[in-house]
Amino acid sequence: MSAVEAIGAPGPRGLARSLFSWAGANPLLVVGGSMVLVVGVVAVFAPLIAPYPADAGSATHPLEIFKPPSAAHLFGTDQVGRDIFSRVAYGTRVSPLIALAVVAIASVVGVTLGLVAGFAGGIVDEAIMRVTDVFLAVPALLLALAFAAVLPPSTSSTILAITISWWPWYARLARGEAASVSRRRYVENGRVLGLTRRRLLLRHVFPNATTPVLIQASLDFGGVILTAAALSFLGLGAQDPTPEWGLMVNEGRSFFQTYWWVVTFPGLAILFSAAAFNLLGDGLRDRLDPRRAVAR
Amino acid sequence: MGFSVRWFGVSVIAAACLLAAATGSAAAPSSAGATAAGQTFVYDSYTQVMINWDPATAYDQEQVALENMYETLTSFNTKTQTIEPLLATSWKKSQGGKLWTFTLRRGVRFHTGRPFNAQAAKAAILRMKKLNQAAAYAWAAVKSITTPTPYTLALHLAYPQPMDLISSAQYSAYMYDVKASGTEDLAKWFGAGHDAGTGPYEVKTAAPGQEVELTLKQFPGYWGGWHGKHYTNIVYRIVRQDSTAVQLVRSGQVSFVQQMSPQLWATVKGSPGLRTPTSSSFENLLLYLNTASGPLQSKAVRQAISDAIDYNGIVTALKGAAIRQPGIIPTGLFGHSPTVPLHSYDVARATQLLASAGFGPGKNKITLSMTYTQGDSNEQLISTLIKSNLAPLNIDLNVQALTTSTKYAKARSTNPADRQDMTFIYWYPDYPDPATWFISLLHTQSPPSFNFAYYSNTTLDKQIDSIERITASNPAQAKTIYRQMEMTVFNDVPIISLYTVEKQRIVLDSVQGYQDNPAYVDVVFVYKIHPKA
């Protein structure tokens, strides 16, 4: 038995219990977390859950076109006979992955630029933030649309287009935190003690900016899923046969009044996942944001 | 609780909007202000109608509107298989079919106000011959034109040709006023949205790129008169969403739907107030394969593609809107040969052919580009099916929906690298004759006009150059040559005929007298129909 365990550090079970206990105080976190968990589980086990995995790819079945929901096809089939349940299940590997990629890239780029701007101040701050302002002046969806329109339609283009419109928010957030922290006494003391700028930035300023960025990132997941779906819906995002939910809605919209299932289930998947990440984000904010904690 | 309803609300609203958008376009159809109510006939087209306004060179979908603005010397009645008088009241051939004399209708005026007579007809034909575009090849035999009297037109031919039939063509046979533009360039004048025909309707408004692209009004001076019941206006409305078209026709806002997804069309059958007539056609959907650049330069790869397509699957998916026929000449036309083999779905042979060219599963990947007409749900469906067929063969097909004009611009790009590898075209005869498939689509063209396979075969070119002459002098030999040409196309695979179109229309019950005439594809002769009282 190690010394750490001997003094009562939680084991895996204890850690899980602590996590549940921490989250349990916030119903939003529990509900949102559970929904995200469902999305994650479906994504991981899609090949086992989907009855017709090939339908998430290039397979088509002309004899099975527009079959209504049944035991054989829980969500029915689409305009080329593909099983919609299988495609919706595999779609959990596309839309949330796009959101993950966008939030990861945008936060890395945005936070880096924001920290540099906030910490350096002066002309560097001005230069970075004016560029940021230019991007912020245009609504994110419009900007993403503009970039997607000039890129060849694909999943990677979707990620790139949304990322370009998303990073400024992180830059502004991180810049604010960095500017605030860099004026605090302990940072000034560090400067006096001769700590390098890099050390100050990475060891003292950056850690203080992580919580608001984490909250913002969790809140952004839902927004990015919706934006990606919107781009695909407009034909500027993922291309067939990618089982992207927005694309599925687009391809089925002509048949909505007659074959309602073609559009409804991918639409509900968008709703579910966007709501899941937003609830989780709200819950995380409630738990992590000290200002909210004080308000409570 | 710290629950912020903002993001949740945004997500719910946005998702709901996305769902609503799926039908939203259908829910707001009236912005264009067009209505089929009363005396206006509204023609619903899934794609742009007026690509080219010049009646001498127009060679796309324009005929659906031009046929109501312009007239030809004769017209072909597919039902009775007879040629009927129109601007010519009678005609006769002599000198072994090398002299055709047309007696022209008197009292006819162009929309410009000038009279139609033999001189005007001669000028129109000569301009078509000079421009030598669209279906002008049909006038190639005309050596000279004389006008023995003001209302007699004599065509002197180099070799016998069925000029009564050619005069009924839906392209390059319109009679128009060549003096309409005065000193201005006539083609430019047409391009500005003018017409100079003798037909029952004339241009009222033209708005290229708009949903209501074109509105025609009655020409008061029409020689046929306006006695009895007639529509006063014709509106050509571009509706790219099939679901919107269904809503518009159900609500009576359009009178006629040209084409739509067979699945949706089937749901309209039996609806009160609507008719859903079907008819055979001489129109087929062809798939071009780029023989001049890219991986499809290889004949083996093209043959592999032809073996990789599940033709029966396409026909099944189109639920009655398509039938398979051998060759590229449809059944019912002279030159059709039932003994031309059908391309068949044979994945094993496709794999072998690809392997012989160094491609296929486990070998080099092929990436191809394919374009189709935006708004054509059938082409969209077929693209998906073909993409699906090719994927297991290690062929990645990038499919792109383009407007008709953009699709053509890409296909006609002077830079071969900018052209597509595969694209679709619907093709039908200019007049009931099969030569157009070969002349317009397969004869060597530089720059390409409609040969989007960029195919060049000197042997085939020679056969094409002589086929019209041989058809007139020796029909049996012409049939043999047509079969030889079909076999060349079958083996070289510059073009694949996917299916022959079965027309599925939606017509308001209030539209009286409508009949499809396969010789004039998708045309509604509005003068001949009328609204129910």
Image (cartoon, helix red, strand yellow):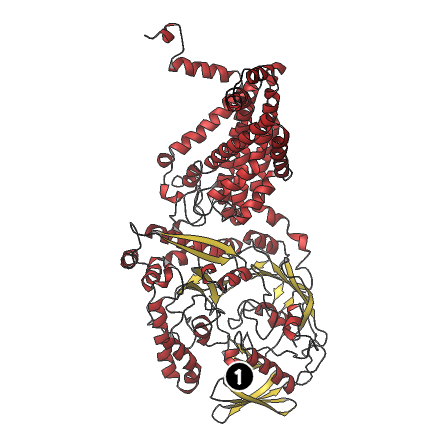
Residue B261 visible, this orientation? no
B401 horizontally vs B305: left or right = right
The percent position of residue A212, horizontal first and vertical second, equals 56, 24
The percent position of residue B107, horizontal first and vertical second, equals 69, 84
A229 horizontally vs B286: left or right = right
The percent position of residue B43, horizontal first and vertical second, equals 61, 62
Q: Quadrant of the N terminus of chain A?
A: top left
Q: Residue at x 54, y 49 (%)?
A: A150
* Residue placed most toward the observer, B486 or A8: A8
Q: Quadrant of the C terminus of chain A?
A: top right
Residue B76 visible, this orientation? yes
The subunit carrying tag 1 is B
Instruction: Classify residue B209 by image quadrant.
Output: bottom right
Q: Residue at x 39, y 32 (%)?
A: A44
In the rendered view, would you say A170 is above or below A56? above
* Residue placed most toward the observer, B222 or B416: B416
Label 1's element?
A: helix
Q: Which residue is mark 1?
A: B164
Amino acid type at image mark 1: Asp
Instruction: Classify residue B459 by image quadrant.
Output: bottom left
In the rendered view, would you say B72 is above or below B236? below
The percent position of residue B339, horizontal first and vertical second, equals 32, 72
In the rendered view, would you say B214 is above or below A22? below
Q: Residues within 10 Å of mark 1 (few under 14, many from 20)?
A: many
* Residue placed most toward the observer, A24 or B398: B398
